[in-house]
Amino acid sequence: MANRILASIPPEDSQRLSRELEPVALRFDQTLYEPGKAIKYVYFPIDCLVSLLTAVDRRRTLEVGMVGNEGMAGMPFILGVGVSGVRALVQGAGRALRMASVPFRIEFDRNPALQQALYRYTYALMAQISQTAACNRFHEADQRLARWLLMTSDRVGADDFALTQEFLAHMLGLRRVGVTEAASELKRRKLIDYTRGQLRILDRRGLKKVSCACYEIVNLVFARAQRH
């Protein structure tokens, strides 16, 4: 498994970039960025997953986007903004490549292939964030949970997750009782198994049928961005 943005860059354009990239192991619940704080590194996930969270109030946050091996965490930096607008939290532990912000900016400015790959990803990420906002407002809890599980599985390459109900409540903008009811319904239909903070997808095809159309819409946008 590799990061798709880095894999898309021709070898002649990636040599300088690869010399500055540092492999790191990201742990579950690790915070990479806080709102209003400087972005010190950009991250290219390999088999980990990063949630982009926005604050609702002093106690609650809501996931507005997720970054896996299709993308990069630290996107404001390519737009000339060195400060994060969201909290970036590792929700799936795993490997990533990171690069300090100053050498990344220098390389970005002189590497057209990297620019094009990240501009296309910016387009797709913006579409994902917009679709997630609509999904959280209009769709039922079990649909949203199914969509979230499928998107997470796609990005980490696994069907098993260490999750708590409190964590899922933050991701989906639900109360814990809402998460319990949604997870219980998916478990009753034998689509997932969920015990003691560990969740496993049992039936991806069935989960896709329960999920709202947002899952396929986001996938289509990413596929379109990669083709151009």
Image (tube, rainbow, N blue to C red):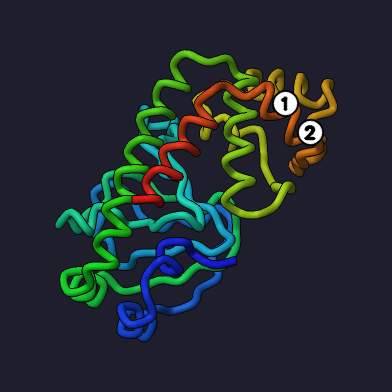
Residue at 64 percent across and 46 percent down: it is: 153
- Determine which residue is flagged by label 2: 192
Q: Position of residue 45 (x, y in %)?
A: 49, 62
**Contact (Cβ within 8 Å) of mark 2 with mark 1:** yes
Is residue 17 found left or right of 171 in the rendered image? left
> Could you tell me which secondary element the residue under label 1 belongs to?
helix
Name the foreground residue: 26 vs 136. Answer: 136
Indicate the amino acid at tag 1: Ala
Is residue 182 found left or right of 154 in the rendered image? right
- Determine which residue is flagged by label 1: 183
> Could you tell me which secondary element the residue under label 2 belongs to?
strand
Name the foreground residue: 95 vs 119. Answer: 119
Name the foreground residue: 64 vs 134. Answer: 134
User: In which quadrant is the N terminus drawn?
Assistant: bottom right
Name the foreground residue: 228 vs 148. Answer: 228
Indicate the amino acid at tag 2: Ile
